[in-house]
Image (spheres, rainbow, N blue to C red):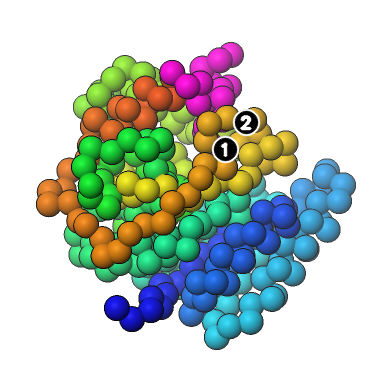
Amino acid sequence: MSEFQLSTPIAFIIFNRPDTTERVFAEIARARPPKLLVVGDGARANRPGESEKVAACRAIINRVNWPCEVLINYSEANLGCKVRVSSGLDWVFEQVPEAIILEDDCLPHPTFFRFCQELLERYRDDQRIGMISGDNFQFGHSINDDSYYFSNINHIWGWASWRNRWQSDYDVSLKHWPKIRDEKRFRDWFGSKFEQDNFVEIVEKVYQGKIDTWDYQWQFASRIYGRIAVMPNANLISNIGFGVDATHTTGHGKFESLPVMPMKFPLKHPTTIFASRVLDSRFWNLAIRKSLIGCFKYKLKQIFLR
């Protein structure tokens, strides 16, 4: 088999963390994408020294030394997580029809890129599939020897998707939420009351502007449009961003710096396409039993441990 060559554009979301940005950029450089789209937020005026950190992150991008078209979308004002990431991804999908997306603290295994590229091609015209994730939070558990499974959960620590899904589905304002909430239609979506209560409480807080995030809107979009996500049966992403400098993952816990494993090729594809309620429920059960709540991306600690 010939050596893999990445042809899919990579979108890289950066901010104020030169240390993690450096490490993720090194893996992107190894993959040598032909097009790199970089989204960056501006420094906060009330954070001394942050402008220097922002500049240091942007300087890393200037070190691209392989044949690559680099497109830049930097904000000089600070927009915050919700607006900057959502508007940045709007811009990404205006430029390219599909992309692999990495944030500055999501360190990929080298096989992550091939995994995404092959499945972007395989499911490009299958509207049931909304995204491809590099994350596996099953801690070594699987139900078969397929390379991946399908999920109703959008894990976004390293992922990929298509323009036609993002542009048709995503709505940062959650305009459909009040109707879904008031009619209690969310009850049709979950296998347990814990999952339901978690989803409802967080989406309501995002809708009210109490949580500054962009990603639960993407999860909500998949629910209302009936799309599912691809999840690898080997974890391909390690989140190295936990700590006091993080936006959301400010604590420590089981999700921190998870080990990565190589994806084996050729991929073994599932013979059927439906979300695994068994594995999704196992994820939520692990979240309770192993106290993963305290470190989960969406600040579950603030919601459930108050």
- For residue 252, which numbered disc appears in the image? 2
Pinpoint residue 208: horizontal percent, then vertical percent.
52, 30
Whether residue 302 appears in magenta in the rendering, the answer is yes
Above or below, 248 against 273 in this view is above
Relative to 126, is 84 on the left or the right? right
Disc 1: which residue: 256
Q: Amino acid at mark 2?
A: His
Pinpoint residue 123: horizontal percent, then vertical percent.
23, 61
Q: Amino acid at mark 1?
A: Glu
Above or below, 99 against 242 in this view is below
Pinpoint residue 263: horizontal percent, then vertical percent.
36, 57
User: Mark 2 Cα within 10 Å, few/some/many (few <14, many 20+)?
Assistant: some
Tell me what residue is drawn at x 20 percent, y 56 percent.
269
Q: Secondary structure at mark 2?
A: loop
Query: Magenta segment, which residues?
Result: 289-306
Whether residue 74 is visible here, answered yes or no, is yes
Whether residue 100 is visible here, answered yes or no, is no
Pick whichever, 230 or 289, lies toward us. 289
Q: CA distance from mark 2 to mark 1?
A: 6 Å
Above or below, 195 against 26 in this view is above
The quarter of the displayed image where residue 116 is located: bottom left
User: Mark 1 Cα within 10 Å, few/some/many (few <14, many 20+)?
Assistant: some
Relative to 167, is 17 on the left or the right? right
